[in-house]
Amino acid sequence: MNSGICPVAIVLMTLACAVATSAENAEIRNMPPHLPKRVNGVHAYAAQSVAAGEEIGFHVSSTEKYRFSLVRLGAEPHSTAKDKTLFTEVGAIAPRPIFPGSYVHFAKPVDRNAAKLTVSCWFRPFRVNGPRQAIIAQQRDDSHGGFGLFLEGGKVFLVAGQQSKDHRVEVPKKVKARRWYHVAASISRKKTGVELTLWLDGKQVKQSSQLDAVSKNGSNKKEAAPLRIGASGHGKLAGHFFDGDVACCAFYGAELSKEQIQKIYRRRGLATIHDPKPLAFWDFSAETGSDLRDATGNGHDGQIVNQGTWMVGGPSFDAGSVNKYDKRYDPRKDPKRGHALRLASDDLYDCRWPIVHRVRIPKNAKSGFYCGRFDYKKNGKSLQHNVTFVVRAKAQVRPAPIVVLAATNTWRAYNWYPFTDNRPAGRHNWGSGEVGRSTTDKSLPSYCLYRDHQSGQPTYKVGLNVPCETGDPYRCYRGSDLWGQWVANERLAHLWLDRHGYQYDVITDMDLHANADHLKGRKVLMILGHSEYWSAKAYKTVERYLKSGGNVVVLSANSVFWRVEFDDTSSAMHCRKFGTGMLGSAWTKPGELYHGKDSSRGGLMRFCGYPGWGLIGLETAGWCHGMKFMPYTATKTEHFLFNKPHKVGLKSGEQFGFFKNIGMVGHEYDVRPSILVKATPKMPPGYEGVKDPSGMTVLAECRSKNKIADYHANENMQRVNPSGVCSEILYWQRPNGGRVFNIGSVAAPWGLYYDRRVGLLVQNVLDHFGVKLPSP
């Protein structure tokens, strides 16, 4: 019950929620009945940020009793000892399933007892072997009747009528992964039986006449299954999900001729409605949203469940033919691009769990990092799950001079295993891949922007309404006792600001994207840690802020690197990555680097018209996981930022920025564009004129024999670095307005927290930017 700490201004309401143990219960948040998966342990998620005085809800699934606490993270960066508990109460066992798997659900079925019926569909499988996948079906596997095109064991087959071997006809040869196929199947019901004909890529491959036709007065009286693309009935639930792409699907109330089917095949998915007029026709031309429109007007409109992925192109499109540096390519004007929808059996962007705890944040709450904390015991071990979120300043309150940007987009991008097993309380050392070894159930969704879907589909978006394990504030990185990624890293800068009495507010990447007013009245925007993923809208907001005379302090590396966008439901973050060398997928081609919302180019910000160096002066030079962390060397100690108002106490050539012989430059690091240009034998076409903008002063540098990624930014094309510089500290008086101070290392907050000289330098910068050190 109430802990007695800060009882005023907090109201907690525990909602009574029915335990959703089966998707056969009432539809869950507008979702048709769907095959569930169990999640063990205690897991939760909440909004990324909330303003002081507002409520925040925690969506929870728990297979154990737990203690729920609302806490403000305290002054000890690697321990919970100084966290401030604001409220606590007991939580009950209430397991809630997840419902992964994307497909299209149709409320209006096709007449399954029609005398003649032909289905036509294009598909490109990513998984060809293993369990059954439904390409398009109107069938339940526990009852007779219906029909469906399926893929199992590499073979495409048609099932119609009573589900038995006698009513199945299959393509003799196996299909291959990641290749487009056109399949057509005719069902002709006659007095003597049912005739099934199967076509693949315009060729008839199988025909079978069955003697035991199903009559309209027989077993077909049983409940009919819904029509689905990418799934079929697993009992009354959607299941047998398809892993691959679908395009240009249609039903015809006739048995199409050889000539008609070959004509459809030759169109390569670019078909419009032709004779014979279809009963239903879907061309997938929307390229965004969750609705699939029936172009015939006959009302067979579909709902896309769990989103799927748009903007992958259809059977007529060679995504590899698009030049990744082409600034003029417009997918909307490409007559051969076509349209398709990519489906995945592990697609999940919203767990759809109910809110179990609803908390009102105090009106006078200090802006910063807070947690919903879940503590419990299992097998004698004390375990903990943390849901980190940001409390923003109350809107009516005068804004603090410093606004700190939390790199929440990056937290989400690295969220490898949302449902990993819970860990003990306090500091724990995880690398990205190590999380997976702590995940008991490997069948749960585990893709992120560094990991393909389970069947190999490139990950082009991640969910926002799912648990975020990378948001754990005590997760240190790769066994380090001092330095952690994400929240643990960023918190060090918060604690340094607190130590010196600076007034600041914290916002998330989503806040910056959604509302430019967060920068109004601010003297400084501070960007921390690993601020890698930016939307074009956020970039433009900061650009306008700088042009109006704003100031930016960057304590981050690999900054402003990948472009992201958000869908209208704010349930997913979209990002298009190319090539394994850039930690993307081997199967991504340049033609798939375009976002569905506005059809504009995705991928690296520098190739989308939003170069990181154009905003903050430095650009990603690369990453080296085995690199020894090194210090900076001061190069221009006569500069006023080393001397006013505080003497930093460094001589030219002296090293700084380390603690216990560990430097603050490592893992990922940034440099001016000129250094990347020198390391690039041949610049990308259209980028030959890239050079350092005027007004830049390098205050310090870190030298390394390590290779760096060149301007192509491909890890597989890392080059010898002629300058020998891998990271820089930069002061930039921007010619277009505004000033930037940039420490180009992902561990910059670590150096700020531990090295007094780095702290003095940043104090001078803040003073120069109009933020005075508070009087003692």
Image (tube, helix red, strand yellow):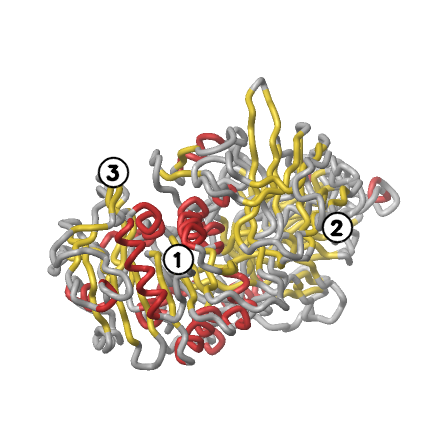
Q: Is residue 143 shown left or right of residue 346?
A: right
Secondary structure beneath disc 3?
loop
Q: CA distance from mark 1 to mark 2?
A: 43 Å
> In this view, which residue lies farthest toward the top?
380
Q: Residues within 10 Å of mark 3 (few under 14, many from 20)?
A: few
Q: Give the position of the N terminus as an image quadrant.
A: top right
Position in image of residue 341 (x %, y %):
55, 59
Task: Tell me which numbered mark, 3 or 1, is placed earlier along the sequence.
Answer: 1
Q: In the picture shown, does residue 41 fall above or below 555?
A: above
Q: Residue at x 44, y 63 (%)?
A: 534
Q: Residue at x 69, y 54 (%)?
A: 55
Q: Residue at x 22, y 42 (%)?
A: 628
Residue assigned mark 3: 660
**In terms of depth relative to the viewer, which is nearer, 514 or 261?**
514
Q: Amino acid at mark 2?
A: Pro
Position in image of residue 281 (x %, y %):
66, 66
